[in-house]
Image (cartoon, helix red, strand yellow):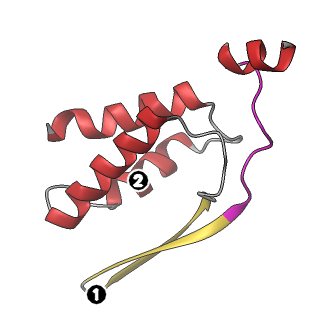
Amino acid sequence: MTTVVAAALNAWGPGGPSMMTAVVCALDQRVETPVFSGAATAYTQREVDLSLGLLSHFVRGSASPSLLTQWWQENQPSAVLHSREREAVLEDWTAPLM
């Protein structure tokens, strides 16, 4: 029961995902950046929906994946963000696209 309450309060979650390298290629530009693996089990439905929405903007060309690289370079997170923090970042990315 304690674990459920802690998870609900965003005070605990499963171990963070491992790191991997994402490669984004566009025209004559190639960018490689470390990212956390998408294999984490602690994603909320809201986070999944926001992520899929952002991906659809990438596919349509109404947003560029460079937005992710720019955020990473500006923020340099040293740990895995908690679910609410990831949702806030996704909301910041998608709000101007709506």
- Secondary structure of the residue carrying tag 2 is helix
- Residue that lies at the very extreme toward the front in this rendered image: 1
* Residue in the picture at 24% in, 57% down: 56
Question: On the picture, is 27 further left or further right than 60?
Answer: right
* Residue in the picture at 16% in, 41% down: 97
Q: Quadrant of residue 18?
A: bottom right
* Residue in the picture at 64% in, 39% down: 42
- Secondary structure of the residue carrying tag 1 is loop
Which amino acid type is shown beneath numbered disc 1?
Asp
Q: Quadrant of residue 60?
A: bottom left
Which amino acid type is shown beneath numbered disc 2?
Leu
Question: On the picture, is 69 further left or further right than 63?
Answer: right
Question: On the picture, is 54 further left or further right than 51?
Answer: left
> In the rendered view, would you say 68 is above or below 79?
below
User: Residue 24 at what x, y percent from top left?
Assistant: 40, 74
Q: Callout 2: 10 Å neighbours few (<14), some, many (20+)?
A: some
Question: On the picture, is 67 further left or further right than 63?
Answer: right
User: Residue 44 at what x, y percent from top left?
Assistant: 52, 34
Residue at image mark 2:
68
* Residue in the picture at 31% in, 40% down: 93
Image quadrant for the C terminus?
top left
Question: Of callouts 1 and 2, which one flags the residue occurring earlier in the amino acid sequence?
Answer: 1
Image quadrant for the N terminus?
top right
Residue 28 numbered tag = 1
- Residue segment shown in magenta: 11-19
